[in-house]
Amino acid sequence: MLRPSKHAHPDRTVVFAAMVMLSRLKFRRQEAYSDLKGYVRKKVVGGETLFLPSLNFLFLLGLVDYHPKTDAIEYVGPNEGL
């Protein structure tokens, strides 16, 4: 769910899960897929189901990249604000 509505809990949306992922990736720069998934699952209610749509959202925005050899997600967005 990307469009907010009055029935959506702010901490249980794709945008919130993407923000949690992005803050982790900005801090670490690169994270293993399973570690990032575990982190989101721990920090976000319903993170198991929100992980993949949030990752797709960040990929479509051009902020992350996936490396299949190492099975890792890398932050490739702008370096401003680090």
Image: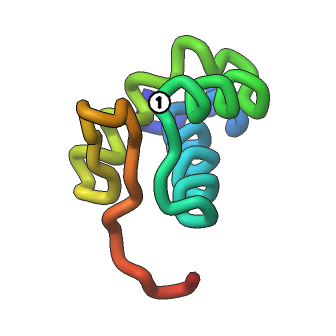
Quarter of the image with the N terminus in it: top left
Density class for disc 1 (Cα within 10 Å; few <14, some 14-19, many ≥20) is: some
Residue drawn at (53%, 55%) of the image: 25
Q: Quadrant of residue 34?
A: top right
Image vertical order of residue 71 relative to residue 57, above or below? above
Q: Quadrant of residue 76?
A: bottom left
**For this view, does 72 lie left or right of residue 4?**
left
List the residue tagged with mark 1. Answer: 33
Image vertical order of residue 80 relative to residue 53, above or below? below
Percent position of residue 28, x then y: 59, 60
Total labels drawn: 1
Percent position of residue 80, x then y: 46, 86
Residue 74 in view here: yes
**For this view, does 4 lie left or right of residue 12?**
left
**For this view, does 68 lie left or right of residue 43?**
left
Residue 7 in view here: no
Residue in the foreground of this view, choosing between 38 and 22: 38
Q: Residue furthest front?
A: 69
Circle 1: residue type:
Tyr
**For this view, does 58 lie left or right of residue 62?**
right
Q: Secondary structure at mark 1?
A: helix
Percent position of residue 8, x then y: 63, 27
Image vertical order of residue 7 relative to residue 67, above or below? above
